[in-house]
Amino acid sequence: MRRDGLFRQTAKQQLDQWIHAARRLAARHRDALPAYERLLWHVQAYTNLLHPSDRAKDNRAIVNAGLLDLALHHGDWIRNIELWHPARQNVWPLFSSLAQHLLARCPVPRFMTSVWLDSSPRTQLRQQEWYKHLGRGENIRTARLPISLTRAMVHWFSQAPHHLTAVQAIRWAQVRGLGGSKRLAAAVVGTRLGKVLENEDFWESVLIFFVNHPLDSDQIGPVVDFLQHQRFEWREGITATGAFGKIPPPQPQYMMKGRSAASLLRQVHDWHERLRKEESQPSIVWRHSPICDFRLIEGCRALGNMRVWTIRELLSTRALHLEGQAMRHCVASYGEDCIQRRTSIWSMQIENHRDQYRALTIEVDLSSKTICQMRGKCNRMPTDREQSIVQQWADTEGLRISEAL
């Protein structure tokens, strides 16, 4: 009983802190604070969206942030919050119902709820405008997108799987509209192209290449990483003058025209080899993310069948190089994203009474707390057992595993 009371007290203190922070932010915007207070009162009175849960995954902070976002758009509300009478549902459909009630005259695809609950702060406002655009019954083609969609792509956008984010749905529609398969669309969505829409003239040529030169699903991610590094990635290192500083992309004019799948894959392989040789460069260290490391013990030492699973964050460019060298993939190229704290990279390892070895490399998008990539040696896909261990860690830390995996 005492433990249960302590849990409720701690949960209430956390919620009070989140609400207090949201009130401060809302007060900076004209009439947003009264709108937030109305939302907060109604949601607490008629739903369990902000009720504490003893499950590992606690969505209250995300929900509260989503309520603040809706309050900031109070000028576009088309219905009063007091007229919303929700059915008892899980978080996602319940919040979807709330957003549609406030902002949509026409049905909005369910995956668009992600713009309130799951988007990066730097893209959040733009994607929320897309939501309101669709809610007014307008075509996604006429929204202010950084990408041109054909009529076929608009059709596929409306058919995108519900588990995708808004950006992933646009990318899914783009691949399908270009003639790509579901398998190719899922593989592309699982790469960095499922997170951002930028440099679209080049990336459209890449997607056309993928459609015309079918590759294995596990080759799509490494190719995208290679092309991003060659064309766009500035990184820390030793410059041509011998100083330590920013190094420009190796091939900023790299084009897909005239290339074959075999030659591209050879370049990706050679790039991996160069990455493994670069570990003599000065190592850069970054801070640990708020996500905790993981440890799980199975079996018994006395019976000789004990195994220890660990998942630990890699916190330096040298650690990334060592991981990439051992696992024979390109994780070393993620250094700049880790330094900027856009991404965190984790190594799953297994130890038994004989030895210790690396099993998986895991990428977590820090803005959305989503596990977006898991790869074993030579970019193999994870086993069912490895996936179940990752799921336990995700449940403990409140992480979401991308449905694209």
Image (cartoon, grey):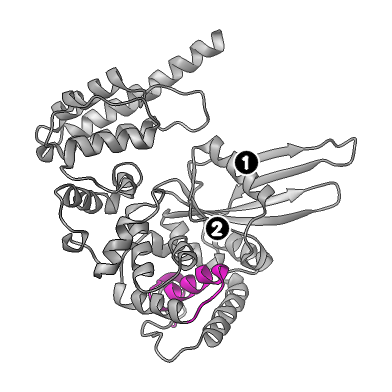
- Residue drawn at x 49%, y 75% is 226
Q: Nearer the viewer, mark 2 or mark 1?
A: 1
- Residue drawn at x 34%, y 75% is 204
Give the percent coordinates (x, y) of residue 49.
35, 27
Vertical comparison of 111 with 173: above or below? above
Along the line of sight, which residue is nearer the eye, 243 or 292? 292
Viewer can see residue 47: yes
Q: Quadrant of the N terminus?
A: top right
Numbered disc total: 2
Label 2 residue SS: loop
Identify residue for label 1. 294
Identify residue for label 2. 316
Along the line of sight, which residue is nearer the eye, 119 or 83? 83
**At label 1, which amino acid type do we have?**
Phe
As drawn, the label of residue 53 is: none
Q: Please state if 266 lies on the left or on the right of 364 as rendered.
A: right
Residue 295 covered by magenta stretch: no
- Residue drawn at x 65%, y 60% is 376
Closer to the chain start, of discs 2 and 1, is: 1
